[in-house]
Amino acid sequence: MVLDIGNSAHKHGLTDEEIEYAIRHNWNSELMQGNGTTPTVMIVGPRHQGALKHDAVEIGVEMQPDKNMHVFHAMPVTSRWLHLL
């Protein structure tokens, strides 16, 4: 599996390391309506080791047919995804 982090995922200042950490150590995730037929998942997890829930991030990921993951969204968790904490 390859993690492809798109430029749009850096819009809110998260680093590649923070994004990867949140994905690998996620607290929860939810399948969501994506564009087209590609499965899309919102992942909520810690920004770094020892992060508390108030420092959680949300990561939007498209699951590619070749099993690779394309990250298109990353930012501090918003009220829309708080239920995943």
Image (cartoon, rainbow, N blue to C red):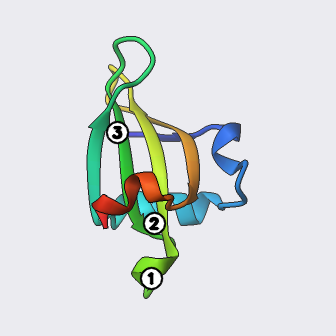
- Disc 3 marks which amino acid? Val
Q: Which mark is residue 21?
A: 2
Q: Do tag 1 and tag 2 residues touch (Cβ < 8 Å)? A: yes
Residue type, numbered disc 1: Gln
**Cα distance between the residues tagged 1 and 3:** 22 Å
Could you tell which of marks 1 and 2 lies nearer the N-terminus?
2
> Would you place residue 71 above or below residue 83 in this image?
above
Picture quadrant of residue 6: top right
**Which dot marks residue 41?**
3
Quadrant the C terminus occupies: bottom left
- Residue 69 is left or right of residue 78, and the answer is left
Residue at point 45%, 66% (across, down): 21
Question: Which mark, residue 49?
Answer: 1
Q: Residue at x 43, y 88 (%)?
A: 50
**Amino acid type, label 2:** Tyr
Q: CA distance from mark 1 to mark 2?
A: 8 Å
Who comes first in sequence, dot 1 or dot 3? 3
Q: Judge whether 37 appears above or below 32 on screen.
A: above
> Which mark is first along the chain, 2 or 3?
2
Residue 62 image position (x, y, % from top left): 42, 31
Task: Work out whether residue 33 can be spotted.
Answer: yes
Front: mark 1 or 3: 3
Residue nearest the observer in this picture, 54 or 20: 54
Name the element at disc 1: loop
